[in-house]
Amino acid sequence: MPPPRLGRLKQNQTSVQEEITKAFDRERVASSEQLARAILRERSAAEDERMKSQLLAKQLEGKEKELKKRETYYKEQLNHLEERLKLEREKERGEREKRERGERGEREGGGERRETEKRDRREKKERQKREREREKRQEREKDERKGERRETEKKGETRKRSEEREKDRERDKRGREKRDRREKRRETRGREKEKTGEKKGR
């Protein structure tokens, strides 16, 4: 039998080992929990970044579409302004040439003046023709844009009417089924009454 002192030492050693083991286990559990929380935070942060990136991408796509629409609109306006400016310059040049030809005609004689007037009238008609064509083109473009809007509205109305027709068909179907069930119950009750009457007669 070991001495009492040696037994106490062994007990103390065992207790110390148990405490060390428990402390190690607690430290390991705490480390695992910290690691799990860190992983969750990283995943949550990554998910937030992904959602933010998707949202920014959608916003950027919307802004790009809006910019393209504005660019198209401004290009059309710029083309119209350039055409008007071109017509104005042609008009000014024609008037200036007319004045110069008139001055020369006064010096050179009436025959050339008449020729100049004919040429002026012809150029004026051409300018008026170009102006009318430009106005027709603008009206046509405006009508096309209105037509696109009407077509979009018409599609919406067609879809709405289709949905209403579908609802009406569904409502009629339910009504028919309800009437059929009522008719079947009535027939069943009639047969049961007939059977009951036959039994009573017997």
Image (cartoon, helix red, strand yellow):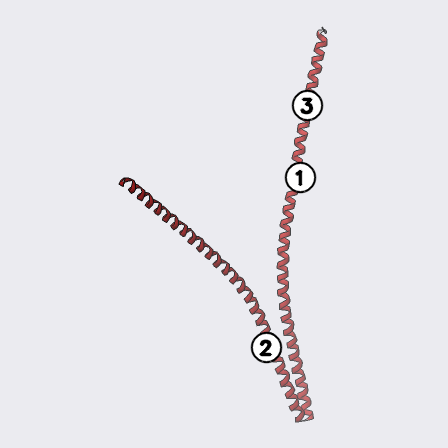
At which x and y percent is residue 44?
A: 64, 40
84, above or below 54, in the image: below
Name the outermost residue toward the left: 201
The N terminus sits in image quarter: top right
Q: Amino acid at mark 3?
A: Ala
At which x and y percent is residue 163?
A: 48, 56
Q: CA distance from mark 1 to mark 3?
A: 28 Å
| Camera-nearest residue between 106 and 58 | 58
At which x and y percent is residue 191?
A: 33, 45
129, above or below 147, in the image: below
Which of marks 2 and 1 precedes in the sequence? 1
Q: Which residue sits at x=41%, y=50%?
A: 177
Q: Which residue sits at x=54%, y=62%?
A: 152
The residue that label 1 is drawn on is 42
> Which image quadrant is residue 87 in?
bottom right
The C terminus sits in image quarter: top left
| Camera-nearest residue between 113 and 201 | 201
- Tell me the number on the disc at residue 106: none
Q: CA distance from mark 3 to mark 2?
A: 96 Å
The residue that label 3 is drawn on is 23
Which of marks 3 and 1 precedes in the sequence? 3
Looking at the rendered structure, the secondary structure element under dot 1 is: helix
Is the C-beta separation of discs 3 and 2 under 8 Å?
Answer: no
190, above or below 31, in the image: below
Is the C-beta separation of discs 1 and 3 under 8 Å?
Answer: no
At which x and y percent is residue 161?
A: 47, 59
Is the C-beta separation of discs 1 and 2 under 8 Å?
Answer: no
The residue that label 2 is drawn on is 132
Looking at the rendered structure, the secondary structure element under dot 2 is: helix
Q: Amino acid at mark 1?
A: Glu
